[in-house]
Amino acid sequence: MTTRAPGAAEGGDPYSLDGKRAVVTGCSRGIGAAIYVALARAGADVAGVHLADQAGAEATMAAVRLLGRRAMAVDANTGERDQVEAFADLVAEAWGGIDIWVNNAAALLVKPFLETTPEDWHSLLAANLHGYFYGCQAAARRMAAGAGGRIINITSAADVQVVNGMSAYIAAKAGVVGLTKTIALDLAERGVTVNAVAPGAIETAMNSKAWDDQVRKTYRERIGLKRIGTPEEIADVVVFLASFAARYITGQEIIVDGGLTINGTVGHVTTADH
């Protein structure tokens, strides 16, 4: 049984990731790219998976190398278990192990439920749920054989404040929350913490396909902080969860949404004092 959190450094900076070996899936753009660079900025070497976006991956790796950290990225489909395992083997063999694994790769489908086909459903879940299972297993096996580690799953505030037309997407993200909580208990004695980060409305290329000016206006009105978030604001929370500072946090979903999901304001008339 592991009783001491992995990566503890007596008297050291609990937020530093110096010397850690990290993995980020969906690393070539958006939130994944921001996480990839932020982990390196905190001191980690970072490997990533992208899907047919070599230019984006090259730009992300270049940013990491400018920070003096090692970087690698491969083109692979996280919905295919064999490809995830091969990638995990590649990283572990090249760097001697894996300390941090961030499951971020995802696809978005906005389509009325009655028009959603079985092909739509299974394709969406392959990326957004099955791929997380494969990533969690690949990471956990290698971490449990070593000194433990951190698994962080990117979920969505949409599983808290539901958006219509996103049945497959939200079902997958909710499934990842259940997976996160369950395996956090399964892996606790092995020194592996498992948490989720749920972004709210974040300006990314993926979201831009589903947003128009009216959607952005509505979000700004509904978000407590009155602005749409940035990928870097998600990445900073991931870095915290990956660090020794978060050693006593596991099985949690942290919502990073600027106050969107807590806002039930509908314009009540102010009541007079009685």
Image: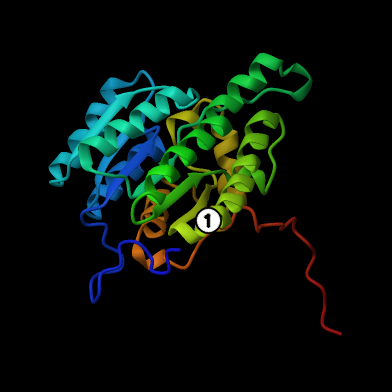
Q: From the top left corner, tell me how far across and down residue 60 is, in percent.
A: 25, 34
Q: From the top left corner, tell me how far across and down residue 78 is, in percent.
A: 45, 27
> At numbered mark 1, what does the secondary structure look like: helix, strand or loop?
loop
* 188 shown above or below 199: below
Q: From the top left corner, tell me how far across and down residue 239 is, in percent.
A: 36, 55
Please identify the quarter of the rendering in which residue 110 is found. Answer: top right
Q: From the top left corner, tell me how far across and down residue 193 is, in percent.
A: 47, 57
Q: Is residue 50 left or right of residue 57?
A: right
Quadrant containing the C terminus in the rendered view: bottom right
Amino acid at the residue labelled 1: Gly
How many labels were placed on the picture?
Answer: 1
Q: Is residue 212 visible?
A: no
* 125 shown above or below 8: above
Quadrant containing the N terminus in the rendered view: bottom left
Q: Is residue 173 left or right of residue 62?
A: right
Q: What is the basis of the colouring in this image?
A: rainbow
Q: Looking at this view, name the residue that lies furthest to the right.
A: 274
Q: Is residue 131 visible?
A: yes
Residue plotted at (48% across, 39% down): 137
Please identify the quarter of the rendering in which residue 212 is found. Answer: top right
Residue plotted at (42% across, 69% down): 3
Q: Residues within 10 Å of mark 1 (few under 14, many from 20)?
A: many
The residue beneath circle 1 is: 258
Residue plotted at (51% across, 54% down): 187
Q: Is residue 71 left or right of residue 170?
A: left
